Image (cartoon, grey):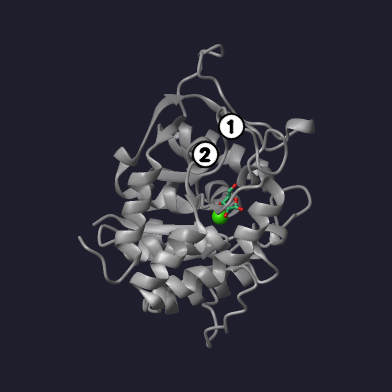
Amino acid sequence: MPKVIIDCDPGIDDALALLLALASPELDIAGITTVSGNVPADMGARNARKVLRQAEREEIPVYIGEMVPLAGKYVDAMDTHGSDGLGESFLPDVPGSFPDKSAVEFLEEALDKEEITVLALGPMTNLARLFQKRPDLIRRIPRLVSMGGSFKSHGNCSPVAEYNYWCDPEAAKICYEMYAEAGKKIEMVGLDVTRKIVLTPNLVSYMERLDNDTGTFIRKITDFYMDFHWEQEGIIGCVINDPLAVAYLIDPSMCTGFDSFTAVETEGICRGQSVTDSMNFWRKDANSHVLTETDADRFMDFFMTRVLKKNPH
Ligand code: BDR
Ligand code: CA
């Protein structure tokens, strides 16, 4: 079972991703680290604990990470995720304090001991800080799966930029550059594939019928997100980005893509855009595996059969 650290910013779809990861026996989750993204890192950590309580996995430690991006002003996504980051469900906090160790310190200590895969579901600030502090540890991350960026899809917070990379483009740029220097490729689960994953109100109702406890939790945190999508994009249901990265981490056949060189723009109107040189104009070695296709029905079956306690499989 590969050890994995989940670096996230819960966040509604992060919460669903955590539920899926926690219900997946293939993953040995060494810890959860949070970063400021959808909500500030400390609120995200409280939300991660709410998900751990829901999944009855409160033994997994949660470490609070970087509160602000490497450069530029921090912009949260509470308009999308609610003022509490979990769709204004206002679930009670799990009592207890957090470890003194920061997310970066935890990542450093854990990677010093052994190889650990990292699943990045938020801005890459913690990872960039780690890479700058301990470049020798980069090669101890066998896989770095990042929900972020886009290849041909439009952005979701500017015409061209996806939120996680837009929130801290300097960090994403450092991660792509430094992971490549260690001879590795970031697996980019971007908007091209994640925008195909839409959780509908019908599905949530059905989940509530099949497993009232889990289904009700999912409904409570997604109602607000559904309304946001209806009001902003006229979509019935909500795009859930992060859980697809979990499914792909476990079963890479969930998505298909190609190896290429990807750069992250940090300047001007394209700030935060990921630019993938699919035609190899720049003659640079591939530093990314960019996912472009997925089967949404297959993903939804995977998601439901794992997170629901009673399922037919
Ligand atoms: C990403 O940004 C966040 O709002 C989501 O949690 C996801 O990680 C999608 O662009
Ligand atoms: Ca996220």
Is 100 above or below relative to 254? below
Q: Which of 86 and 218 is in front in this view?
A: 218
Which amino acid does the dot numbered 2 rest on? Gly
Which residue in the protein does label 1 denote?
153
The quadrant of the image that shows the C terminus is bottom left
- Measured as percent of width and height from the top left, residue 183 is found at 40, 31
Give the SS element for disc 1: loop
Contact, mark 1 vs mark 2 (Cβ under 8 Å): yes
* Residue at x 54% of width, y 39% of height: 191
Give the SS element for disc 2: loop
Q: Which residue lies furthest to the left in this view?
A: 313
The quadrant of the image that shows the N terminus is bottom left
* Residue at x 64% of width, y 52% of height: 229
Is 147 above or below relative to 98? above
* Residue at x 68% of width, y 31% of height: 265
Instruction: Give the alpha-carbon distance from disc 1 to disc 2, as whole Å.
Output: 9 Å
Q: Which of 272 and 286 is in front in this view?
A: 272
In this rendering, would 106 be left or right of 39? left
The image quadrant that residue 263 belongs to is top right
Which residue in the protein does label 2 denote?
190
